[in-house]
Amino acid sequence: MAVTGPPSPATPTPTPTVTPQETAPIGNPIFARIRIANSSDVPHLHKLMYQHAASQRLTHIFSSTESSLSATLFNSPPFQSFTVFLLEVSPTPFPDGPVGCHPPITRIVNLDLPIVDPELKEFASGGEAVVVGFVLFFPNYGLFLGKTGFYIEGLYVRECYRKKGFGKMLLSAVAAQAVKMGHGKLDWCVLGWNANAFGFYKKMGAQVFEEVKMCRLTSDALQACESFS
Ligand SMILES: CC(C)(COP(=O)(O)OP(=O)(O)OC[C@H]1O[C@@H](n2cnc3c(N)ncnc32)[C@H](O)[C@@H]1OP(=O)(O)O)[C@@H](O)C(=O)NCCC(=O)NCCS
């Protein structure tokens, strides 16, 4: 009589192997770069600054021109005075450029959906790159802290690029430079109604001083004050 052995064990279910496709980023990757702006960026900067004024409901006081920007920015080495970081994105990697005092910061951002940019042509900046936003800052001093810092005069991300991490990337670039230079603070002002900006800044960990109000002397009042002495 034939002896039947124990039933052969069931064929084990093969462990699924992870294919490179499954580990590759899903979604829509885009290359982002932050670099120091220069005088050739003035036309883009001027448009961004006007849009920023519109976002703050302040176009009625916007009198900056491309000439005034060219005359007043880029006259000092970066970080010693007014400095602008420009953020660009591209569907293809940015070419390596000359590395100056601040090598560009690059990231790959994986988007859920591709961005439809209605101003692609106006903000094209060479190759497939497009300008997305900026941050303008300069050194200041906190006498109560006895610490140097940066004051952020403007931070702006074009509307169709918001809520994708680009504002954070710009603010973080300024924070990284501040830390690198041994600064102890970053300051900026926010209009009281700008709940969107407060939401963003609180998320970034900023402290809000509710009791502080900003003061300014311009035009006639500035002239008048000058004559008091
Ligand atoms: C404020 C501004 C720069 C933010 O840029 P952004 O690219 O939309 O912000 P990000 O996508 O980088 O957001 C970073 C984080 O803040 C959060 N955040 C952004 N806006 C927020 C809001 N309104 N409320 C709560 N959280 C917010 C994001 O969810 C994100 O959180 P995470 O890191 O956990 O993912 C942008 O909205 C803007 O340019 N606004 C118009 C100009 C302006 O008001 N500038 C500030 C003037 S003081």
Image (cartoon, grey):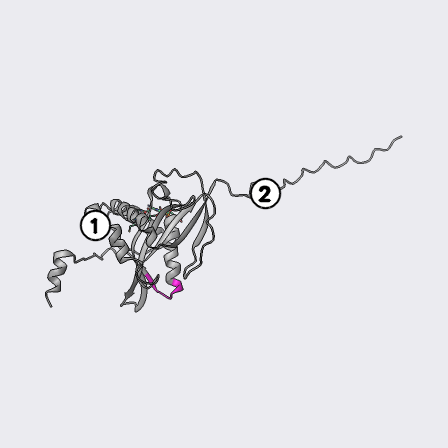
Mark 1 packing: few (<14 Cα in 10 Å), some, or many (20+)? few
186 lies above or below 162: below
Magenta stretch encompasses residue 14 = no
**Residue at image x 38%, y 65%?**
181
Residue 229 placement, left or right of 7 = left
Q: Quadrant of the N terminus?
A: top right
Q: Looking at the image, which is closer to me, 66 or 36?
A: 66
| Coordinates of residue 189 in the picture (x, y in percent) | 26, 55
Q: How many marks?
A: 2
Q: Position of residue 71 (x, y in %)?
A: 26, 57
User: Where are the magenta residues, as a range?
Assistant: 179-185
Q: For this view, does 159 lie left or right of residue 224?
A: right
Amino acid at circle 1: Ser
Q: In this rendering, would 17 be left or right of 5?
A: left
Count residues near mark 2 (Cα–Cα under 10 Å), then give few for <14, some for 14-19, many for 20+: few
Q: Earlier in the sequence, mark 1 or mark 2?
A: 2
For this orientation, the residue located farthest to the top is 1
Q: Is residue 97 above or below residue 143?
A: above
Pick the front one: 113 or 4 = 113
Q: Does dot 1 land on a helix, a strand or a loop?
A: loop
Image quadrant assignment for residue 226: bottom left
Residue at which label 2 appears:
20
- Mark 1 lies on residue: 63
Judge depth for marks 1 and 2 and give the one in front: 1
The residue type indicated by label 2 comes to Pro
| Spatial CA span between label 1 and label 2 | 54 Å
Disc 2 secondary structure class: helix
